[in-house]
Image (cartoon, coloured by chain):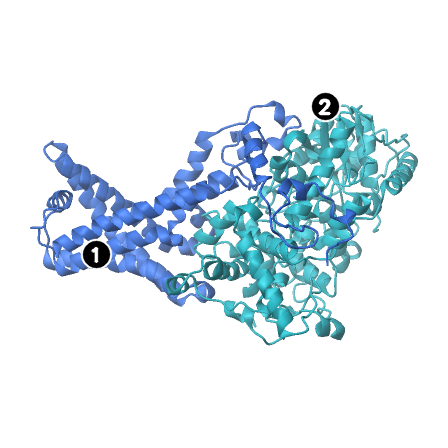
Amino acid sequence: MKDVDIRDISRRNPEPLVLPQLNELKPLPAQLGGGEGPAFTPLSAQTIEKCECGLDGTCALNLPKPKSREEEEVLVNKFLAGVEKLFTKENNWTFLQPLLLTMESCTRCQTCSDSCHIYEASGRNEMYRPTFRTEILRRIYFKHVKQGGMLSRFQHGDIELNWPMVARLAELAYRCNLCRRCAQTCPIGADNALVAHELRKIFSMEMGIAAKEIHENGSMKQLKTGSSTGMNPAAVKDNIEFIDEEMSEKTGIETHTPWDVEGAEYLVLHNAGEILAWPENPGAFATILNAAGVSWTMSSELVGYDSINYGLWYDDAQFARVALKHVGAAKNLKVKKILLGECGHAHKALSVIADRLMGELNMPRVSSMSVLRDIVMSGKLDLDPSRNNFPVTLHDPCNMVRLMGVVEPQREILRLIAPQFREMEPHGVNNYCCGGGSGFAIMSPNNFSDWRFQISGRKKLEQVLTAFGDCLDPAIPKYVCAPCSNCKGQMRDLFAYWNLWDKHQILYGGLVELIVNAMTNVKPGFVEWAWH
Amino acid sequence: MTALVFLLMYAGMLVFLIGCIRRVLQYSRTPLHLRWELYPVAHEEPERLRHGGSYFEESEWWKKDQHSNLSGELSFMIPEMLFLRGLWEFNRKLWYRSFPFHFGLYLLIGAAILSGLGAILGGFAFGAALFAIARLFAWSGLALTTVGGAALFWRRLTDPELRNYTGLGDLLNVGAFALACALVIFGKLAFGMVSMGTFARALLTFDTSVKLPVMVAAGLMLGSAIVGYIPYTHMAHFVAKYFTYHAVRWDDTPNNAKIAAKVAEYLTYRPTWLAPHIGGDGVKTWADVATTNPTATPEVHK
């Protein structure tokens, strides 16, 4: 089953190339009794009939099957045109250099494979190797873009370009969390996660194919309504007003979120998902910033109140559009800086990747981790660590840590306010992805959730259980601090799937919640030990 | 025969240099890309480098000069280049094969340079010393490259993990090195040969009266061919590595006037991406695309 050949990707047989078997996956953590987990939900007959499902028994894109060979040919030609554009500076100046370096320099030594949590969790399934999809694109590149002849085939191998290959490659581009742990271990500096990113770009930017959750219901909805959650400016203000009221009641401190304050020190950008799914997070931010006397505001300008930028994962144009809206909202309010809330991809999107796109709009973008550290260390808040006297571990969001280098501020805070703080292993820049990275946390089409709980999330599950190995007794409540909205989304679903709350009383949440929980002027018990 | 060997050695070197320069130009002429760094970044200040942190850990990072840390970079790059630290750390099994191969090549390069210097400075007392060191480098380099190359060849041939990623070209790459070095070793041992100093002087002066055993000549010709072939394959990763580290992984330079000017030019490029939400018609620029809201038009994605 695992012995899949690169050339199989072009196989015309509609059966999946591989069908991950429970007994082939990495055994479950010993804390869950080892062995196998629940069976995968099979794809429905309707999905199999209508959609391209020839990869691995799951389906992230719901890519419709072409009705004829002619239609297939049109799609293949579109794909090929997209590949060619990917290697031109006019179309891909944004990532051309790193892409070329990876295409032409990887020695295919497979050093990166063991660093990939998906490859490891799948029981070292060949198709999930970081290099598998890269090898396909490399062969296409040398054959069709570089127009290589016999010598090129001798050097790089051959591949048949047909619709089954294109359809499988589209799905395969969505079997990588883009965490870039593989790139970190490559001695040459090749980057197989970048290849998954670039493949997604071909499909979206040339063929109009992308995961519905991140494009149609993600960046497009954000550009249309202001937020991928669908909240327009009036709705977000209503929701925040409600949160302020709830927070005031819960904390005993009057909480107020300022809106559209011109000239404020910070424009605070939250992932709007927090406002709906974890309202205590923006509420805790408001409590802390107000208590510390910080000058801040939120913006009610379209897109200016939702930090998400899903374009980061699949489309340069969508990425640039949203990033410019964010910084534009800040400029319009004449704030001095942008403060990024607890959202990893928003951190990297606006601070790192968009940095060179800012032009005249350039302005400081700051991590909430650093600002919170300064506030906590300044003594402006009266904190009682004993209120957080339960086991706490920290999840490092890849985008914020490995890909942006914000590693220590959150730890400095936790060491001060959480007496039972312990690290996961490995941690920091060597962390493992939660399994929800690159959009997976919000993607649940067909049986894709099973794949992300059983495979992409399995390593994080193991890490969490190991970090709490000395206190798994359900009588002891435990807290996974995950200062990232998407990571929390994945943990919520992952922990529910594996029943970690009932079995071990393991809760997840953000960092600000722990800070507010330790504030002595806040009513005790801000962190609610209940599963939501 | 000697003339042919010498000509091939010169040609191999020349083609190698042209290929390397071509690669450097190719990569250095690609546009400045969006930032895509990966931490740890070796030129961060030592305290932050220890945990892989960046200047973003400071809440007012833009007020400070960007830190440079040459010793941080060198302490990463020297062990990486000389001793393949990455492989040692992440793929020990491969290191045992790859390190002798690479280090053997370094020793051969060292031997070539030293013997060349020795030939030029032959009249001086230390000329002989240079040849002595060069001889040591050459023998150990030949031995290590043969052993390492053969081990890599065997791994490529037998490791099921590499089945999908090994073509005839990959086998040739490492196999030819091992074979070339083995031919020189056995040719020299079996049939004898002029001293290294004599050979180096003959090569530099194109003195074709020097006799070379057939095996040695074959090894040198094969070696020259493979040297010339290197830059046209992924074996030129030593060139790429400069860019992957300095221009990608470690490039954390914040936006500045120079960068902004470059990007302003790129924003005038006219993309041709055809998805409806982009509508790259070759007329609109990147700046137009980035400032267009696709939901404002009736045409939507999918």
Tell me: residue A145, above or below residue B38: below
Q: Is residue B108 visible?
A: yes
In this image, A12 relative to A452: left or right? left
Chain of the residue displaying label 1:
B
Tell me: residue B256, above or below residue A191: above
Of labels 1 and 2, the one closer to you: 1
Residue picked out by circle 1: B221
Q: Is residue A168 visible?
A: no
The amino acid on which the numbered mark 1 sits, given as a three-letter code, is Met
Q: How busy is the neighbourhood of tag 2: few (under 14 within 10 Å), some, or many (20 plus)?
A: few
Look at the image and tell me in which quarter the N terminus of chain A lies: bottom right
Instruction: Report the front residue among A226 and A90.
Output: A90
Q: Quadrant of residue B168?
A: bottom left
| Residue A447, position as x, y percentages in the image | 73, 65
Instruction: Report the front residue among B3 and B44.
Output: B3
| Residue B247, position as x, y percentages in the image | 49, 39
Q: Residue furthest front?
A: B283
Q: Which mark is residue A40?
A: none
Residue picked out by circle 2: A378
The amino acid on which the numbered mark 2 sits, given as a three-letter code, is Ser
| Residue B76, position as x, y percentages in the image | 44, 38
Residue visible at 29% across and 52% down in the picture: B228
Which colour is chain B painted?
blue
Which colour is chain A painted?
cyan
Residue visible at 48% across and 47% down in the picture: A189
Q: How busy is the neighbourhood of tag 1: few (under 14 within 10 Å), some, or many (20 plus)?
A: many
| Residue B49, position as x, y percentages in the image | 53, 34
Chain of the residue displaying label 2:
A
Q: Secondary structure at mark 1?
A: helix
Circles 1 and 2: CB distance less than 8 Å?
A: no
In this image, B126 relative to B152: left or right? left
Residue visible at 52% across and 37% down in the picture: B251
